[in-house]
């Protein structure tokens, strides 16, 4: 079984999120999604519209997702990959090069983001 992992906040789930989840799942048999905990978001200076448990609940209902785990810090990626026997690490191409250190543990792939949509844009549109 080929295992894939990706990370994100996945706040205000939208078409771009579904696209990256679908494309990540196409790279293997099992997709683990690791989402930022509320505490980790706070450390990063981010505030999610939805709390962790709601974001986790929604992602668990997405047909491409096989498992959802919490992210508590930047450093846990290596242990997540090793502990979950991950073969492929996937992130959006806005992160290109940032996770190349994981190539010692698995294949690293940066996928193109969906044009014209992002959680940041949605939040901005709500304010306007």
Image: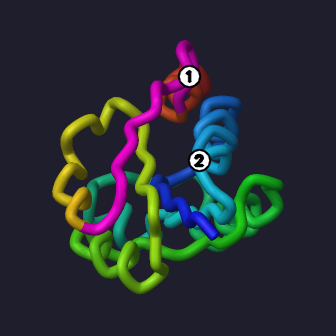
| Residue 112 sits inside the magenta stretch | yes
Q: Where's residue 65, x and y in %?
A: 71, 60
Instruction: Please name the residue shown 20% across and 45% down the image.
Output: 98
Q: Where's residue 124, x and y in %?
A: 50, 24
Residue named by callout 1:
114
Q: Where's residue 74, x and y in %?
A: 25, 67
Q: Where's residue 48, x and y in %?
A: 51, 54
> Residue 41: which quarter of the image?
bottom left
Which type of secondary structure does the marked residue at label 2 adopt?
A: loop
Q: Residues under labels 1 and 2: Cα distance?
A: 17 Å
Q: Residues within 10 Å of mark 2 (few under 14, many from 20)?
A: some
> Which part of the image, by quadrant, shows the N terminus?
bottom right
Left or right: 98 as drawn, with respect to 59: left
Relative to 23, residue 117 above or below: above
31, 48: nearer the viewer: 31
Residue farthest along the front direction in this orientation:
1
Q: Main secondary structure of the magenta part?
A: loop
> Which part of the image, by quadrant, shows the C terminus?
top right
Residue named by callout 2:
27
40, 3: nearer the viewer: 3
| Residue 42 sits inside the magenta stretch | no
Marks 1, 2: nearer the viewer: 2
What segment carries the magenta color? Answer: 105-118
122, 59: nearer the viewer: 59
Q: Which comes sooner in the sequence, label 1 or label 2? A: 2
Left or right: 89 as drawn, with respect to 60: left
Instruction: Please name the residue shown 62% across and 55% down the image.
Output: 28
Q: Residues within 10 Å of mark 1 (few under 14, many from 20)?
A: some
Instruction: Please name the residue shown 35% across and 69% down the image.
Output: 40
Q: Tell me the number on the disc at residue 46.
A: none
Which type of secondary structure does the marked residue at label 1 adopt?
A: loop
For the residues bearing labels 1 and 2, Cβ distance under 8 angstroms: no
């Amino acid at each position: 079984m080929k295992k894939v992992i990706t990370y994100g906040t996945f706040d205000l789930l939208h078409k771009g999120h579904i696209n990256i989840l679908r494309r990540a799942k196409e790279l293997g048999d099992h997709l683990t999604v690791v989402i930022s905990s509320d505490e980790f978001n706070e450390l990063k200076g981010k505030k999610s519209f939805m709390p962790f448990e709601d974001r986790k609940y929604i992602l668990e209902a997405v047909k491409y997702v096989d498992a959802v785990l919490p992210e508590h810090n930047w450093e846990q990626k290596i242990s997540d990959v090793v502990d979950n026997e991950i073969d492929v690490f996937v992130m959006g191409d806005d992160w290109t090069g940032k996770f190349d250190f994981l190539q010692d543990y698995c294949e690293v792939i940066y996928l193109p983001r969906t044009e014209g949509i992002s959680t940041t844009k949605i939040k901005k549109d709500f304010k306007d």
